[in-house]
Image: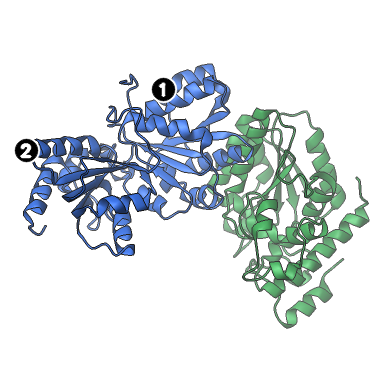
Amino acid sequence: MRNTEKFLREKSYLYRKRFIELFSGFGFGHLTSAFSWAEIATVLYWEFININNDNIKTDQDKLFVSKGHGVGILFPVFEDLGLITGNMEDIVRIGGDNTRIRDLVYPGWDFYGGSLGIGLGMAAGMAKGNQLSGSQANVYCIVGDAETYEGSIWEAINFAGHQKLSNLIVILDRNRLGVTDFTENMLKIEPISDRWHSFGWETKEINGHDVKEIYGALVECLTSKSVKPKCIVANTKKGYGLDYVIDKPLMHGYIPKGDEIEKALRELKK
Amino acid sequence: MVMKTKTARDMFFSTIYEMIKNGEDIYLVTADLAAPSLDELRIKYPEHYISVGISEQNLVAVASGLALSGHKVIAYGLLPFVVTRAFDQIRCVMSELDIPITLCGLNCGLSSAEAGYTHVSIEDLGMLNMLPNIQTYTPSDISISGKIAEETMENNHPRVVRFDKAVNYQIYDETTEIVNGFHVYHVDNNGKILIISSGSHIKMLRHILDLYHKDNNSDLGLMDIFRVPFNESKFIEIIRRYEKVLVVEENSLHGGLSTRVLEILNDNSIHMQMVRNGIDTSKGWFDVYTDRQYIRSFNRIDKENIVMTIDTMLRGSII
């Protein structure tokens, strides 16, 4: 690792804190979905994806945020890396310019919405395109566990497995919560690793909040000799870092407002 | 020069094949739909032929990702499914992100009417008309189809091409320009009725106009709209030469070609009588087995009814 575990954990905390500051002012935000993958985003951008202002458009690793509503956590990451400059509070507001984020986030949707079930297919298409042109660039894709209810996800999984897209690495944010209920109450998706595996993928389960495990799993993917695409099933908690929202259904669109902002900042766990 | 290729679809793919043979960086992604013109591509350049199986949503997503990685991409599947089923991907990705892929759909309009409503593609034009950045083509002959294919390498915006299996002839020659998105036939400086149509209707309508002109009736002109959006200022210049307009289409009356014409007339304060003959689904679909001819006749877009409509409009009677 280029950075220490402590460094990466602190960054994750700071990004959650900044998320609260930015999006509570905006009034919208999928806090719980953003917080569930904060460590993953931190490790990806600090250890693997070497993006800077000179190489955004050129041949280098890309991350597709298929669970688009979770993209908000990347705003503090990009701000910290100097990829979004200027006053963030002036950007993240109604009427604020969203063009920069479109350059940085794949597939380039304008904000934290996106349409579920689409990003993985695009990531697979890009991975295939990279293979065809002989590029060494990898394609990462963050997929939500409840997002896998969308049939188009399985179309993409099937395609990637058949095409042996070894340069495609999916991180499945397995926070076990959809919007209204836990996944295993609504529509079971376990055994999730076996399902991906049966479609021709390599899978590995990790603690999605442990930066060392995240790093180790990604290294394993990148050094693997297998021609299969890789899926890291990252066990996470929706809203991780803020105890009062963890494991609570119907907190999908939650963002602190008014007095709650102080409370959230105070209770945010390091 | 008369081309040997059979259909508009085959002309398109033959042209693409030649471009790939010449080293162009073009890839075809197909939703398990083949064509005689693709057989050689599959064998000789298999790496340029990628199948996603029957999965239209994945077709558009994968094609878009492939294009984002720097390649030119043709996606191919069956209408209406490539539009109706993959509309979210077309909307959020192709259109909103302005990704320059060419999505080809076979069997537009009533091409497969005998297969029932599910295989009838009459709403797709209206759906696509609502989206920014997308150009939708309905080639009326094989030469237009070939020209659309030739544009692929210069194309910087998303396109949808709707092939009709009945279009297996050549109307235009190689000098025909497609830049305005339409072509006119027997259009004079002033006339009574401008007929606007597209696709497989054009050949029939040209024949009808020839008959009228043979009878020294030069009150009719024809506009073949093979691309939407088209050059509106040129369109307005031509339509102003006429008293009335008749739109004949194999699309739903709600949102199809005639809706687009109505919008332009209204937005430019052009007042003229307009008759719209298209597919009326306001009372639902049919309770009987149908085919193209049956549905055309029912909706007054077959030859006999079109001539009756024209005669009525020429007499000045109300339709």
In percent of width and height, residue A247 lies at 71, 65
Residue located 61% across and 63% down the image: A181
Residue A270 picture quarter: bottom right
In which quadrant is the N terminus of chain B drawn? top left
Looking at the picture, does residue A65 appear above or below residue A220?
Answer: below
In percent of width and height, residue B102 lies at 48, 38
| Earlier residue among tags 1 and 2 | 1
Classify mark 2: helix, strand or loop. loop
Name chain B's colour. Answer: blue
Name the subunit of mark 2. B
Any idea which chain is the green one in this picture?
A
How many other residues sit within 10 Å of disc 1, few (<14), some (14-19) or many (≥20)? many
The residue that label 1 is drawn on is B37
Q: Residue furthest front?
A: B189
Name the subunit of mark 1. B
Classify mark 1: helix, strand or loop. helix
The residue that label 2 is drawn on is B215
Figure label count: 2
Q: In the rendered view, does B79 fall on the left or right side of A145?
A: left
Colour option used: by chain
Q: Which is nearer the eye, A234 or A27?
A: A27
Amino acid type indicated by mark 1: Ser
Amino acid type indicated by mark 2: Asp
How many other residues sit within 10 Å of disc 2, few (<14), some (14-19) or many (≥20)? few
Residue B240 visible to the viewer: yes
1 vs 2, front mark: 2
Residue located 52% across and 36% down the image: B154
